[in-house]
Image: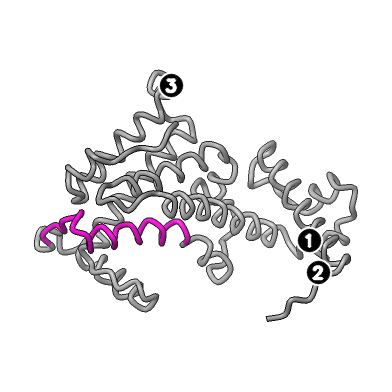
Amino acid sequence: MSNAPVTRRQRLRDATAEEIKSVARTLMARDGSSSLNLRAVAREMGMTASALYRYFPSRDAILTALITDAYDAVGEAVEQAVAAAPEDGTATAMLAGVHAFRRWAVDHPQEYGLIYGTPVPGYEAPEEETKEAAMRTNFALLGLLARGLREGLITLPNQDRLPPEVSAVLTDMADAEHKAQLGLAPEVWALAMQFWVVLLGSISAEVFGHLPPTLGRGAGAFFDFTMRRALAVVGVRQAAIDAAVSPPG
C-alpha cells in the first residue's frame, strides 16, 4: 500500500468537495431535498455550475455522496457504542447499539431523513456505491443478534408458526444474504426484521415529530422501554433484559 503524502492540490480538492456537500445539506434543510440542484449550490459557493461539475457531475452525484456519508456516520456511531459495551451476558450491548442509533438520528435529523425518510423524487441511490455504508448499522446489530444466539441469550421462535408467505419471503432473504456470508436462517431473519421495524419506527416517530408532546418530553425513556419490550418479543431472555444497563440520556 502506498504511503505517498496527499498533495496540496488533492487537499484543496477534498476541502472543496466537503464544502459543496455542506452547502447542499444547508440548502436541503432550508428548501427540502427535492429542490437541490447544482446551480443553487454553485450560486451559494460563488462558483459557476461548470466549475462545480469538476467535483460532482450531477445533482444525483451529490445526493449519493451525502447518503453514503450519512450511512457511514450512523454506522460508525453504532459500531463504536457496541464495541465499547461490555460482553456480560446481558442485553447491555444491544441497548447501547440502538440508543446510539437514536442519538445520532436526533442529533442529525436532516441526514436521518435523507436515508430513512421520504425518497427524493427522481433519484434512486446506486446500490454499488451505497450498500456497503448502508449495511454498517445492520451488520453491527446483526452481529449482536448472532452473538446472543451463540451465548443462549435468545431463543428462536418455532419456524412452523411463521405464515407460509412470510416464511417464503424470509427464506429468499436468507438465501440472498447467504452469498454475503451472513449465514442467517429464515427464522433469524424473522427476528431481525421484526426488531428493525420497531426500531426504525420508534426513531422515525420521534425525529419526524409524530410523538405526542407529552410523550416527547420523555422520548428517551420511552424509547428505552420500547426497545426492552421489543427485545423480549424477539426472544431475548427476560433476565438478560432486566440486568441490562441503558446508556445515559
Circle 3 — which element? loop
Mark 1 and mark 2 in contact (Cβ < 8 Å)?
yes
Q: Which residue is mark 2?
A: 6
Circle 1 — which element? helix
Q: Is residue 84 left or right of residue 190?
A: right
Q: Which residue is mark 3?
A: 217
Extreme-top residue of the structure: 214
Of tags 3 and 2, the one toward the viewer is 2
The residue type indicated by label 2 comes to Val
Is 152 in the magenta? yes
Mark 2 and mark 3 in contact (Cβ < 8 Å)?
no
> In which quadrant is the C terminus drawn?
top left
The residue type indicated by label 1 comes to Asp
The residue type indicated by label 3 comes to Arg
Q: Please give the range of residues in magenta.
A: 136-158
> In which quadrant is the N terminus drawn?
bottom right
Name which residue lies at 58% across and 68% down.
129
Where is residue 91 shown, x and y percent of the image? 28, 47
- Label placed on residue 129: none
Say whether disc 2 or disc 1 marks the residue closer to the N-terminus. Answer: 2
Name which residue lies at 81% across and 69% down.
6
Q: Which residue is mark 1?
A: 14
Say whether disc 3 or disc 1 marks the residue closer to the N-terminus. Answer: 1
Residue 118 vs residue 202, the one in the foreground: 202
Extreme-bottom residue of the structure: 1
Q: Is residue 193 left or right of residue 167?
A: right
